[in-house]
Each structure stands twice: as structure tokens, then as C-alpha cells.
Image (cartoon, helix red, strand yellow):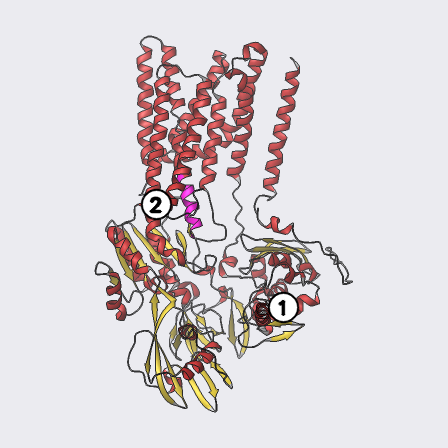
Amino acid sequence: MSKYHKTVADKAAKTCYHCGEVCVEEIIPYDDKSFCCTGCKLVYDVLLENDLCNYYAIENNPGGTQRNVSTRGNRFDYLSDEEIIRKLLDFQNETESHVTFTIPLIHCASCIWLLENLHQLHDGVISGRVDFLKKTVHVKFNHQRISLRDLVLLLSHIGYEPTINLADVENKRARPIDRKLIYKLAVAGFCFGNMMFFSLPEYFSEAELLGDGFRGLFNYLNVGLALPVFFYSATDYYRSAWIALKNRTVNMDVPIVIGIFALFFFSLYEIFIVGQEGYMDTLGGLLFFLLIGKIYQQKTFDTLSFDRDYKAYFPVAVTRVKQGAEEVIPLTKLQVGDIIRVRHEELIPSDSILIEGEASIDYSFVTGEEVPVNKKQGELVYAGGRQKGNPITLTVQKSPSQGYLTDLWNNEAFEKKEDSSLESLATRISGKFTVTVLMIALAALVYWSYTDVALGVRAFTAVLIITCPCALAMSTPFTLGNTLRIFGQGKFYLKNPQVIERMAKVDTVVFDKTGTLTDPSAASITYQGEPLTLQTKAIVKSLVNNSTHPLSNRINSWLEGVHLERLDKIEEIKGKGLVGLYKGQEIRLGSADFTGAETNGQTGGNQVFLAVEGSVLGCFSIQSGLRPGIAQVVQKMGKDRDVHFLSGDHDHERVHLQGVFGPDVTMNFNQSPLQKLDYLKKLRQAGRQCVMIGDGLNDAGALRESRVGVALTTQASNFSPASDAIMDATALTNLPTYLDFAKTSRKIIKASFGLSFTYNAVGVFFAVQGLVSPLFCAILMPLSSISVVVFTTITTNYIAYTMGLKKKII
Amino acid sequence: MEVIFILIGISIVMASSFLWLFIRAMRSGQYDDTYTPSIRILFDQKVKTKEKEVPSTKSK
């Protein structure tokens, strides 16, 4: 028991009170609490001073680590620029300004509490309002007391630095939320409910009892209630059907509109001319159910953004050096020839030439490979990389919108609209459906007209009314909506339901290699040189333990279980390696020229050398390992689909990969972003339906050109290039199942079409005989809709359960 | 039975006012974020221990 308490206490002492991370480098005791870094301590200090320590009471260790946060004071200077302020603010009058920040760190109740109590930190802040799901905070502040720049500084002081990027500045985010559909549904629901109410006596022939006065009143009320449904709620269908007819096609909405018109005008005729009850309640019900289906399909993943281009992660401002002095200017004002300075963890905004300093650039956003690339003076540095280490100075060669990488966005692939050559299943069927219905209706008209013209007209309209494709129109949105939700639970987020139909037709799978097939954490490490003793291992482990460099992390996890040795001095030289003192001996771990080793000309993977007192002991070769389970995934998919690899790397791994994945896989190495795009274009021209899986910005073109572009990411809320779908890296092994399930959902749609055809057949059987009554309509219509909804919901969920995509059936 | 005319009038007025209230609530953004308020409601209204002048929202 006491032992247990001791370990808990130990743990508490070693984790940071602010961020909850284990304190590795140093423990800063302060106010009876321990902190992992001065950053975390400072945040605590600020909160303590302002009596906001409730922050720590709501959740344990709610903060984010402050270890790698830049503390340079002038990095927000660009927020003093009038133009930028104007673009960022949502609203401004003489005293008040409103602004919405995106803060990715928002993750718990404490975050909400703190950000909504900002006014206690600074009296210029009027209020803060958090939208947890969107990870935004809407701040109202008095700009005479606190400037926008100071507000952002304040937020970053308490650890909640907002992300402000080029996209925020260039096009205002204020996209009004589309609530129209909900209004339409509300109106339809209101009218439907009331019409049912007034039609009830008719259903049970009670109207005679009430007398003609009531009957007339009820019918006129129904007409009055049908007007908003006909002229407001149904307008989307008119528009869509009209566009389809103008393009000489027939989509699902055409038969719906025919049905709506038949219902409305025939009811008007019945009520005003014949003096009967009409079908207005059925019209209301039809629109109500249709709109529910439409809303169900519109599942959106608010926190994810599927349309991001390079602007969404380029910085708003850069540090320009002019006549020896630094100034922070908006990126839009950056010109070719300017000299810029890029600091640790800052992004290189445009293709530039390195003129001073040592560049160690992390291109993980671009290529997915997180090991930094070293560049020498005079070399061209492409935009999109993140500098690690000391500040570097560069001369701008191209404007940010015209770099090597951003050129992709000028490609025609980004200009064309979503093409509709691949028409959906529902569209194809509805064409035939409409023609068939019209034929039957006409046949009924002609047949009865020989004996009784009035009966012929009644049969004609009855067919149009009863075959109104309500159930038909419901099956697609509900099946796809369910599939979308099931995928979402499996961390596979689709942009919209149409992607599912495209997925179902996929016959070719294209993978990006780096970061997609390979996984940094699955790196394989081989050591060559003098054998390592346990003691040397311990020394190496202690060295790498102190570094956040990706290669250090990999060696660290390779040496798992090795105990730590106490070193006298440890220093990390950014971009070069680590140096430590052990019993007076200098231990170096790092690149070849840092340790004095000779490169053996081997290019495969990354190499880290170990040297003691200047003599090289050996070398760690680190090769990016494959994601666990990926070989089976590729083999499974290779059975009925073609698999291609595209890689920006050299082809030294070709033999290895071919061995793992089998001979049927087509591999292409040394592919530039544009070549990747062209490759997909060629496949498309060859009539292939491709799904492309990539992760970096360099895949953006290929993702765009493919039928279904899947962006793979380790954290769904993080950056991912524009795509049709975003997939969590852990879900990649499920990809074959997802593709199969997309096919299955097509089958479910077909099956539910069959079901609704049965209803229609029954309805038509009565309709052609002129036997359709309003009561019959009022029962059959909701019954068919609801049963189709129940059928699709149960089958999709059940099949997902049997395929292992869901743990519970419902 | 004529009372039904009045009742119908009342019922329509009531139902329409519910529709109007719903649309008004929707328009004011009450349904935009359905998650955060569920957390917000659990926060304690803390009484200020430190004497600090209450900031006025109006500029002087």
C-alpha cells in the first residue's frame, strides 16, 4: 500500500503541474508544484497572480507544454498593421472590436473556462466565447485599452497562442452558416403537422358530422398551409430539377417535382372545383420526409477542413532585414529580392537562397519525412520547410505564390470544378423511373378516356401522385449518411456523401510512400562498428534523451529498457548533433562532419555517428520502417485492384519494398509533386478510377487529380492538404474494408430501391384503376418512407458490424 | 360546435408562434454550438476573493 502511494507521489513530482508531461531535463519547483520548463511556470505565475488557478482544478494538468514555444517579443508586430487588423476583425465600432481566433490547443473544460475568463486577466477584454468543437474563441475587446497585438500576446502568455495564417487574412472566414435547410424543414414540419390535424376528420369520414362549414374551412386551411410548403420549402427541388432539365438530364429531383406539382394542382382542383378534400397533407408529409433525408446526409465534420491549400499554413508575416534592422511585415508585401530572417520553428515562406546561417529544414509538412534536411550557404531552399535551430538569413527568389510547391495550385487540376461524368446511382435510375411513370400514367389516361374522360384524368394524376419517388429519394441520403457516420467512427472522415459512390468504383490504389506507407515510429535501426557495451548504450541513451530531434527519438526508442547514465554536460548543437561529457571523455553523437567520421558513400536512410574523444566507434543507420500491417493491406488490395506507389525518394528501397509487397505493385521513385499529379492524370485518362493516399503538401496535386483523394494524418485536426477524405493514420489498415463497404452501401441503395419499387407497384395497381383516396395516400406515403429509412439504417449498421467496422450494431 | 372555430384560431396562432420562436432561436445562433454550453453550465461562479475594480465595458 505504502509502496503504491510512493510511486504515485513520485510520478506527481515528476510530471509538470501545468502540462502533465514528464519532466525530463529539469524540474522547476515553484509554489510546491513542479514544472517541466520555465514556460509552464510562467503561465502558472500569470494565472496565480490573477486568481485564475481554478484552471487547474477543473481538469488535471490542462495546459499545453511551453517548452518549444518561441518567446520572441516582436513576432506579432504584424498585427499592428492596419490592413491586417481590418481583415482579421469580425466587427468594429468606436469602442469595441470582435475577433475570432482558432486555437488548436483547446481540448478540455479548463481551456473553455480560462478563455471565457480572459476579462479577469486584462480589463480591455470584454468577453470570450469558446466554440469547443470548432476550436475557436470569439473575443470581444475594447481596442482602446488593448490592441489586437497585445491580445494575441496575452493569449500566448497563457499558453493559448492562436494560429493566424495567410488564409485568414486573404479571404475572410465569415462564411455564414447555412441554416436555410433547417428553416425549410421547420416550415414543412409545422405545415405538415397542422394539415394532418385538419385532415383527420376526413380520414374517418367525420367531416359529414361536422357539417359543410367545417369541411370547407378545413380544406381552405389546408390550402393556406400548403402554400409555404409549395412556395418555400420545396424551392431547392425546383432549382435542382430545372438545372438538370436545362442540361438535358434527369436527376432524382425531376420526378419529385412532377409529384409535388401533381399533388398541389390536383388538390387545388379537387378543393375549389370539385369540392373534395385533396391531398395537401400528403404534400406536406412528402416535403417533410424529403428534407429530413437531406439534412441527415449533410453530416459535416466541423473541426476538419477539406479545402486547405498552402495558404492555410503559411504564416501571415515574415521578418525582413532592411538596412541592418529587422522589421516584421505581412507576407503579402514580401517581394523578390528581399532579405528575410527565419528563426527556430518558423516556416520558410518562399523559395529563397540561403545566405547566412546553418539551415536544418524540416519538410514534414511537405513530404511527410520528419528528419530535417541540411542546406549549405548558396543553396536554394524551397518554401514550406520549417527551420530547426539557429536563425538563418535568406534572399527571396520567388514570391510566395509562385514557389516550387505552390506552383501546384496554379495547375489546371485546381481550376476545374467537380466533374459530374460519374453520375450517381440515384440519378441514373431516376431517369428510367420518370419515363416509366409517365408512360404508365399516359397509358391509364388513354385507356380510361375511351369510357370516362374524368376517370382517365383522375387515374393519370393518381399515378403521378402515388409513384412520387419519396422512398426512392430517401434511400440514397440515409444509406450514404449512415455510411458517412460509420466511417467517421472509424476515424475516416469524408468530405461529403458523394465520395462514397466514387469510392465504390475504385479499381486502382495509389500510395505515396514517405509518411504514408512508412511510419517514423516504426523505424528500423542497424548499428555498425565496434560492439556497444551496456555502458556505452546507457551513455547514448542519456544523450538522446535530451534531444527532441526525430533521429534522437528513434535511437531513444531503439534503446528501450536501457538505464540512464549520469553525464556531466550535455549540449545539443542544432543541425549537427549532441555532445556530452562522461568521466572527462567527450562523447559526440551526430552527423559525419560533426563527429569527424567519413561517410562510406552509403545513401540509404539516415546515419548517426558515435565518436568518443574524436575516434569514431560506429554508426547507427536509421531506415524509415513500414507501418505495421501495411503489407497485408497492400496484398489484400492487390487482389482485385491495381496498386501503385509514388515516392519522392531515391529508389534504394525498391528491392526491399518489392520483396515485401510482391511483384504486382508498380513503383515509381524520384517523383516531383508535378510528376505525381501527371501520373494520376495519365491513370485517369486511361480510364482508371483512382484512390490516392498521401499525406504531405507535395501530394496535394495528386490528391486533387484522383477520384478520391485521401489525406492521411496522425492527428485529424492537424494540417492536411486539400482532399476528399481525411483518414487517421491508425485507420489505414482498414482501408480495404472501407472500400468494400462503400461497394456494399451501393448494394444497400439498390436493395432499398427494390423495396420502394414494390410500394410503387402496389400504389400504381390501385392508381390505374382510379381507386386512390386521400386516406390511402396519407397512409402509404409515410409508411413507405419510414420503412425505407428503417431498412437502410438497420442493414448498413448490421453489415458494418459484421465487417468489423462497428463494435455495436446500433 | 361553433367554439371549434375559435379553438382552431387559437391553435394556429400558438403553433405559428412556436415556429416563429424556433426560427428566432435558430437565427440567434443557439443551435450553432451544441456542445460547449453543456460544459459551460458546470463552471462554478466564483466569488472574487481579490479586491479588484470591476472593469467597465464602456470606454471613458
| Badge number at residue A303 | none
| Badge number at residue A43 | 1
Measuring from the top left, give residue A319's x and y in whole percent. 52, 72
Q: Chain of mark 1?
A: A
Magenta residue span: A479-491
Whether A485 is among the magenta residues is yes
- N-terminal of the pair, mark 2 or mark 1, is 1
Image: A765 above or below A337:
above
Local packing at callout 2 (Cα closer than 10 Å; few below 14, some 14-19, many 20+) is many
Distance CA(mark 2)–CA(mark 1) = 48 Å
Where, quadrant-wise, is the N terminus of chain A in this rendering? bottom right
In the current view of this chain or complex, which residue is farthest to the left? A663
Residue wearing tag 2: A742
Overall secondary structure of the magenta section:
helix
User: Residue at the spot x=25%, y=54% of the render?
Assistant: A638
Q: Nearer the viewer, residue A154 or A133?
A: A133
Q: Amino acid at mark 1?
A: Val
Image: A491 above or below A295:
below
Measuring from the top left, give residue A140's x and y in whole percent. 65, 55
Q: Amino acid at mark 2?
A: Ala
Left or right side of A591 for A187 = right
